[in-house]
Image (tube, grey):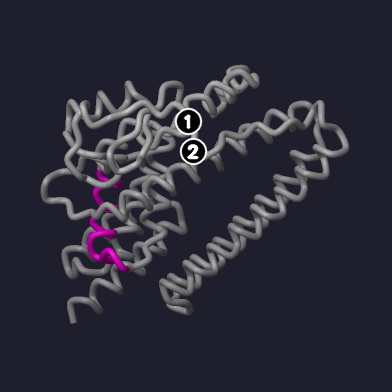
């Protein structure tokens, strides 16, 4: 009975959200949680609403609660995506996830998934900025990429609507969403390859290899060090993290400054990246 009442309130929240009535939607979702607090979709829907309201802390808490309910073996891409969105726009909130409140139940696997989603969101936002730069130059590639982006968003919205109407289950919706994203990435890569081949001087790729990115700040590194678990971080960033929590950010295993070692091979790759002219455009990252 309680779960049914919660579902009805969730649907009212969904209607309010679609109408742009975010405060009303948040209230309906909160009432739904009070009726039944074990449905992860209610928390992710409220998190999305709180994103619109720029209530970042509360949105992070909702995402973490949804992930906790889903469990370590569940697929909760929606919650991880929203976390990635929050941190990519509001980097200060990364601490809420990497150093969560004691009562928060989030596993090392969840942390690695979270980091991957944040990096994906950062790359997506960087791609948007790069398209805007090209569009201002009257570049055809930007227009074509924007067309592909709009098509991708329509398809993702369609899957989300089917999930809300229970025409799709959580796993099937996640799989379809992943297929849409992979198809988009493939088409964009093929499009860029054509333009690079035709005009390499003006279409030199602006990319940051994943292995050069510090997984705390999600910025490219200069002086990487390696933990005893094999994870590499920017030296200054991991030192600052260890002042707050003596653990590896991605595994939660005990970690001290004395456990860290320079990563000379990765440092050489970082130096090559910066010497390639990345400092001229990295401000857009």
Q: Quadrant of the C terminus?
A: top right
Q: Earlier in the sequence, mark 1 or mark 2?
A: 2
Residue 30 position by quadrant: bottom left
**Disc 1 versus disc 2: distance between alpha carbons?**
8 Å
Residue at which label 1 appears: 266
**From what the image shows, is residue 128 above or below residue 113?**
above
User: Could you tell me if the residues under marks 1 and 2 are in contact, i.e. CB atoms within 8 Å?
Assistant: yes
Residue at which label 2 appears: 211
Residue 187 position by quadrant: bottom right
Q: Is 103 a magenta residue?
A: no
Name the residue nearer the viewer: 55 or 83: 83
- Residue at point 88% right, 37% down? 198
Estimate how packed mark 1 is, as few (under 14), some (14 to 19) or many (20 or more) residues with alpha carbons within 10 Å: some
**From what the image shows, is residue 83 above or below residue 247?**
below
**From what the image shows, is residue 1 above or below residue 250?**
below
Locate residue 266, reporting x and y percent: 48, 30
């Amino acid at each position: 009975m309680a779960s049914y009442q919660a579902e009805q309130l969730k649907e009212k929240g969904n209607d309010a959200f679609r109408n742009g009535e975010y405060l009303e939607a948040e209230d309906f979702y909160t009432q739904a949680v009070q009726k039944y607090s074990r449905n992860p979709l209610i928390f992710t829907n409220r998190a999305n609403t709180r994103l619109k309201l720029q209530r970042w802390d509360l949105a992070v808490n909702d995402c973490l609660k949804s992930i906790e309910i889903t469990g370590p073996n569940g697929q909760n891409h929606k919650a991880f995506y929203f976390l990635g969105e929050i941190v990519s726009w509001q980097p200060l909130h990364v601490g809420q996830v990497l150093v969560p409140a004691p009562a928060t139940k989030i596993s090392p696997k969840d942390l690695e998934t979270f980091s991957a989603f944040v990096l994906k969101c950062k790359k997506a936002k960087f791609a948007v900025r790069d398209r805007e730069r090209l569009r201002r130059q009257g570049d055809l590639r930007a227009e074509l990429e924007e067309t592909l982006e709009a098509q991708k968003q329509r398809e993702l919205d369609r899957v989300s609507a089917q999930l809300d109407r229970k025409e799709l289950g959580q796993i099937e919706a996640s799989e379809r969403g992943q297929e849409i994203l992979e198809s988009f990435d493939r088409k964009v890569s093929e499009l860029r390859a054509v333009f690079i081949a035709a005009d390499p001087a003006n279409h030199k790729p602006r990319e940051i290899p994943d292995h050069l990115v510090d997984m705390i700040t999600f910025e490219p590194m200069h002086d990487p060090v390696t933990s005893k678990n094999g994870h590499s971080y920017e030296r200054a960033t991991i030192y600052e993290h260890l002042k707050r929590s003596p653990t590896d950010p991605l595994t939660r295993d005990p970690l001290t400054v004395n456990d860290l070692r320079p990563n000379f091979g990765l440092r050489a790759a970082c130096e090559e990246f910066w010497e390639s002219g990345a400092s001229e455009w990295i401000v857009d990252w």
